[in-house]
Amino acid sequence: MSFDQQDAQALSDTARDRLWMHFTRHSTYEHGGSVPIITRGDGAYIYDVHGKRYLDGLAGLFTVQVGHGRAELANAAAKQMQELAFFPLWSYAHPAAIELAERLATYTPGDLNRVFFTTGGGEAVESAWKLAKQYFKLTGKPMKHKVISRSVAYHGTPQGALSITGIPDAKKYFEPLVPGAFKVPNTNFYRAPQHGDDIEAFGRWAADRIAEAIEFEGPDTVAAVFLEPVQNSGGCFPPPPGYLERVREICDEYDVLLVADETICAFGRIGEMFAMSRYGVTPDIITCAKGMTSGYSPIGAMIASERLFEPFKTGHNYFAHGYTFGGHPVSAAVALANLDIFEREGLNKHVRDNEGAFRSTLEKLKDLDIVGDVRGDGFFYGIELVKDKATKETFNDEESELLLRGFLSRALFEAGLYCRADDRGDPVIQLSPPLNIDQSHFDEIEQILRSVLTEAQTIL
């Protein structure tokens, strides 16, 4: 669907005057700028109000795994609405949530069999911290309430999840937040402060900072470590070899829960239903959302081990927590249909078979002076931009503002690529496309990036 120019402008004006967009500088639109309006999607592409096509290089927001316009997902939603549009999971159950919980338990590593549904990833993270606190209170360790997470990591916007988040600029407007959240270094090997010539030694060093933080805070006060298998914010930091294994050892040694925040990494993004399975480490809790329905309907989940559920089986104990729309029947039905597509089309195998080609296509960009690093796993990559490739010198705040917001975000979109130009950390471009794209799409992404980044080199 496209609109004539008058209707398109009217929509933009209404968006400016009525819609409070998320994480948005509204000053951009107060003096004549038009709000970009996306009206439909088809496969790997989205279309704006004028009918212009863009390659969706971010899968909406790390979400639309199976691509846009899948009629079977719309049909699953409509069918469920006719049967049971809504019922809560507060002491009751409904078939869609039951079946989805069983389905998820077949994918999880270890004995992570207890599924607590939410409506998104931030709520799942919030739920995991609350569970960690209550679990230790019920098992005789009531002082264990603190959490360790990593610098620059993003874990959500609710007050608890925001405390776990390691991005100062995201938190400063809302402080004081929930106390008890402490930060350790992340796994950005490109800017390793130690062992920059040995990735395994760097991974051991980064993991040992977690043990150091637990010791400093007191092991009897620390409840959980939160980490993403591949850290999103900062630009797609994979775990160095041995890193996750060492974190698991540390958590076991100090009786601290390991929480894998797979809001982005789950459901094929790294080539497995759950990324921790790819890396061979079993956490105590997984949080997930986004790709469970490929974004066709909102849902999230906290999935916990049987050990953590055990205290809630007896007496008057119950998890004093819940959400009206957690495990919504329509969302659960859509999730089941989405997972059917995963299995029928072999999307996880497709990612594993093609991630090398995607990476090598993006690595062609390293011949540009502005491209310092290409990193990631699966179909999830970050391209770090630098001022000086030889020294890895980054851009200062003013230069980064000019580069990312003043030029790249607009130029990439105008060139037909929707992706993320981000400066939570050093400047990066992030790519997280639908999981069923192929070499032709990899080439299209590379060609657009090459053209725009070549021009970017001339503006600073």
Image: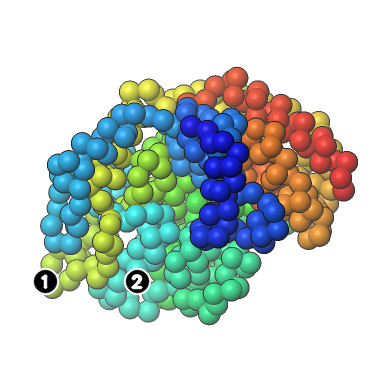
Find disc 1 in the rendering and name its residue: 315
Percent of width and height locating residue 279: 47, 40
Closest to the observer, 358 or 410: 410
Q: Nearer the viewer, residue 80 or 450?
A: 80
Circle 2 SS class = helix
* SS at mark 1 in the image: loop
Q: How many marks?
A: 2
Q: Residue furthest front?
A: 6
Dot 1 crowding, Cα within 10 Å, few <14, some 14–19, many 20+: few
Q: At which x and y percent is residue 131?
A: 32, 66
Q: Position of residue 52 (x, y in %)?
A: 60, 31
Q: Residue at x 18, y 54 (%)?
A: 87
Q: Is residue 32 left or right of residue 140?
A: right
* Image quadrant where residue 309 sits: bottom left
Q: Nearer the viewer, residue 84 or 59?
A: 84
Q: Name which residue type carries label 2.
A: Lys
Label of residue 365 in the image: none
Q: Is residue 92 left or right of residue 161?
A: left
Q: Is residue 422 visible?
A: yes
Whole-number angstrom distance, CA of label 2 to CA of label 1: 19 Å
Name the amino acid type tagged 1. Answer: Gly
What residue did someone put label 2 on?
A: 133
Kindly identify the residue that appears in the image at 53 percent across and 54 percent down: 14
Residue pictured at 36% horizontal, 49% vertical:
298
Percent x, y of residue 51: 56, 31
